[in-house]
Image (cartoon, grey):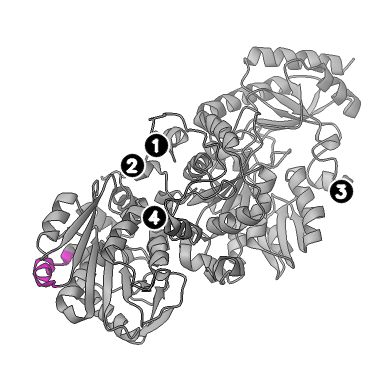
């Protein structure tokens, strides 16, 4: 049988979007630390500005180093294109702002990153965009929350911090039955473990600060377009299907077909809101992406070992990890993410908040900080930090308890991680 | 814009400017299971440089009514009917792949309607691999996979698209996925069965440019050159490193080749 011989995932992590530099033959992606790019002549300049020719004008809108990262992530996610942003939050905002304006409504999973919850619940309403929150395990709850002015369904492939596994296909079906797109934050899974477009999602976003970058050195975001949503058939998205005065009456769906969303996100969103990624940041994230597969394998391997270790500890009250048989999403996780369900999980310490504080302060290798997805192992207490703006009801809906510790397992020697945890757990119970 | 051709809607993109039949017209005809969006950059350039542009969706493709038309000759007749509907007496034709056969056939049989002919990825005979054809007949995903794997050159499969952040392989696959069942087979089969290419090439009288991809696996350079040699006075431009889908793989080089061949009207 004929074989298309497409390049495979691990090869794409190293090569997609880049060829050796034509001038000097540089093998690594050069950092084009330049705000702007010289036009060949006045006609070339005008043609670039009017989207008659392709290329770079100004690094707020696009940059050659950043473009390599964008293309590489689009390739790894299986999308038609991507836009890199200053942070994951900027990617989320860009996605929302590209799709809708005031008077719109979002139905979001209740189990999402605290910052995203904050944007939906408290900040976007000031701009006339409201949100409802639904149980990520209940696609019917998403359906019930949809209003005539709903423009987006949203969730995380792996919920933060509770690791609720979203049934992306079921929620995508709800979205599509209502002429709406589904956006998935795929930060915790990365495309190595899960590719939302394969399961019906329409838009993917990442905090590339986490596992994609992988080394805790750069704040970064990515917005990826699956190119599958039919904006014309939906009829609910004038930003995609009606002439845009900000670009000589350009109709994005008509002009760019499957790339309509990502082109609008760049040509309007980066141009006007300006939350662009710097080339230096793109370089850092690219360095991480090159080793994504091997790192994720090790992250998952270490996480499984740590979960197993903690399961045998008296001081541990409970563990939430979807690979454990008792987890509510065990079967779904097994089906959707056979290579592992990430390297972030939560557990409770006997003795509540006080014991939790003692535990965290006793750790020597684990770092206590507000991040996940670093090569180094990390811990945090969500209720007092990342999710502190939520009230008790929202915390309960998000599955964040007072005794919860969120852990991001790094790449250290597993024996050292176990020793560190064992010692801190003992001290927490004194 | 929408045209009514034989009672059916035909969609034509106009490059971001309303179509003006008084301007020198350029009509773009896409490849198999594609649509007008494959010409997104080139059409905008010409529309904003003094031409009237129509980038068509063939019947049953993109936004045009179906059904798809099964032969090159019938599609060439349809193309002339589109010119009638748009009130265009004479146009330059730009065709890619199956579109190149359609425009070639139209230029041969309707010489007074065609001012110039640009053929992209044009090789005759345009035989289609049996396995691809059978897979397309069965509406298998493999047909889409093979079409794009062989359509885009190997270099393009690493990306580095000149439109920043664009992963063109998936874009190509999305276009085929959006096509109704049977459309890819219809187009491939029309190419495979077309037997009038040599005769048509011998009859073309208008200025002709053949734009070829150096690494084209669908319509190889050697065959494309042999085909161009059948057309009196035809010139060629070979785009280094490009595969079959050169207007996407190398949009600026493709535009430059077309620009040299179809210069802007004097007033610009």
* Secondary structure mostly taken by the magenta-highlighted segment of the chain: helix
Chain for disc number 4: B
Residue at the (43%, 69%) spot, across then down: B48
Chain for disc number 3: A
Residue at the (13%, 67%) spot, across then down: B197
Local crowd size for mark 2, using a 10 Å CA cut-off: few (<14), some (14–19), many (≥20): some
Pointer 1 with pointer 4, Cβ within 8 A: no
For marks 1 and 2, give the one nearer the viewer: 1
**Image height of B102 relative to A35, above or below:** below
Q: Which residue is mark 1?
A: A19
The kind of secondary structure element at disc 4 is helix
For marks 3 and 1 on the same chain, the one whose residue lies earlier in the sequence: 1
For residue B155, the mark is: 2
Question: Taking A265 as reference, is B87 left or right?
Answer: left
Q: Which residue is mark 3?
A: A393
Q: Are marks 1 and 4 on the same chain?
A: no
Pointer 1 with pointer 2, Cβ within 8 A: yes
- The residues tagged by marks 3 and 4 sit, at their Cα atoms, a distance apart of 47 Å
Question: Taking A136 as reference, is A271 left or right?
Answer: left
The kind of secondary structure element at disc 3 is helix
For marks 3 and 4, give the one nearer the viewer: 4
Q: Are marks 1 and 2 on the same chain?
A: no
Chain for disc number 1: A
């Amino acid at each position: 049988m004929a074989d298309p011989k497409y390049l495979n995932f691990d090869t794409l992590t190293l090569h997609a979007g880049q060829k050796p530099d034509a001038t000097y033959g540089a093998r690594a992606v050069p950092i084009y630390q330049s705000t702007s790019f010289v036009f060949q002549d006045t006609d070339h300049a005008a043609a670039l500005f009017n989207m008659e020719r392709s290329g770079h004008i100004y690094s707020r809108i696009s940059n050659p180093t950043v473009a390599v990262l964008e293309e590489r992530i689009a390739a790894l996610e299986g999308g038609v294109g991507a836009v890199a942003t200053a942070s994951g939050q900027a990617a989320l905002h860009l996605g929302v702002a590209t799709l809708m304006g005031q008077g719109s409504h979002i139905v979001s999973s209740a189990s999402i990153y605290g910052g995203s919850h904050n944007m939906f619940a408290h900040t976007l309403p000031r701009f006339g965009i409201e949100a409802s929150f639904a149980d990520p395990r209940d696609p019917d709850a998403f359906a019930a929350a949809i209003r005539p002015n709903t423009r987006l369904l949203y969730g995380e492939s792996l919920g933060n911090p509770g690791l609720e596994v979203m049934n992306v296909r079921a929620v995508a079906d709800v979205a599509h039955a209502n002429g709406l797109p589904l956006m998935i934050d795929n930060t915790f899974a990365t495309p190595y473990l899960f590719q939302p477009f394969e399961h019906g999602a329409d838009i993917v976003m990442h905090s590339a600060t986490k596992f994609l970058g992988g080394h805790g050195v750069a704040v970064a975001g990515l917005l990826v377009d699956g190119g599958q949503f039919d904006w014309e058939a939906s009829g609910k998205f004038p930003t995609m299907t009606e002439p845009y005065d900000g670009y000589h009456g350009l109709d994005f769906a008509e002009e760019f077909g499957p790339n309509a969303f990502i082109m609008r996100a760049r040509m309007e969103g980066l141009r006007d809101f300006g939350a662009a990624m710097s080339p230096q940041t793109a370089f850092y994230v690219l360095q991480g992406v090159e080793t994504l597969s091997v790192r994720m394998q090790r992250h998952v391997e270490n996480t499984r070992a740590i979960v197993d270790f903690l399961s045998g500890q008296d001081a541990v009250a409970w563990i939430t990890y979807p690979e454990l048989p008792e987890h509510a999403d065990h079967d779904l996780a097994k089906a959707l993410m056979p290579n592992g369900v990430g390297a972030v999980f939560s557990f409770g310490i006997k003795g509540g908040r006080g014991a939790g504080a003692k535990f965290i302060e006793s750790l020597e290798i684990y770092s206590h900080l507000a991040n996940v997805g670093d090569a180094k192992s990390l811990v945090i207490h969500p209720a007092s930090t990342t999710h502190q703006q939520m009230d008790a009801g929202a915390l309960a809906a998000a599955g964040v308890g007072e005794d919860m510790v969120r852990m991001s397992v790094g790449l250290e020697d597993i024996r050292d991680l176990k020793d560190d945890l064992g010692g801190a757990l003992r001290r927490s119970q004194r | 814009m929408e045209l009514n051709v034989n009672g059916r809607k035909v969609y034509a993109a106009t490059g971001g400017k309303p179509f003006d039949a008084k301007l020198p017209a350029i009509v773009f005809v896409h490849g198999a299971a594609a649509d007008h969006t494959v010409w997104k950059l080139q059409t905008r350039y010409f529309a904003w440089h003094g031409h009237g542009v129509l980038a068509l969706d063939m019947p049953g493709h993109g936004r045009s009514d179906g059904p798809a038309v099964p032969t090159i000759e019938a599609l060439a007749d349809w193309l002339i009917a589109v010119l009638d509907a748009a009130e265009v007496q004479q146009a330059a034709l730009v065709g890619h792949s199956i579109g190149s056969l359609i425009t070639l056939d139209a230029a041969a049989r309707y010489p007074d309607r065609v001012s110039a002919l640009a053929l992209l990825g044009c090789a005759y005979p345009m035989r289609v691999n049996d396995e691809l054809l059978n897979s397309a007949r069965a509406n298998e995903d493999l047909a889409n996979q093979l079409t794009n794997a062989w359509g885009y050159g190997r270099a393009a499969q690493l990306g580095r698209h000149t439109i920043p952040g664009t992963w063109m392989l998936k874009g190509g696959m999305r276009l085929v996925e959006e096509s109704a069942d049977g459309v890819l087979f219809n187009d491939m089969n029309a190419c495979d069965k077309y037997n009038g290419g040599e005769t048509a090439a011998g009859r073309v009288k208008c200025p002709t440019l053949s734009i070829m991809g150096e690494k084209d696996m669908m319509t190889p350079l050697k065959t494309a050159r042999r085909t161009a040699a059948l057309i009196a006075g035809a010139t060629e431009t070979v785009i280094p490193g490009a595969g079959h889908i050169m207007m996407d793989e190398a949009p600026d080089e493709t535009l430059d080749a077309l620009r040299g061949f179809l210069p802007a009207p004097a007033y610009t």
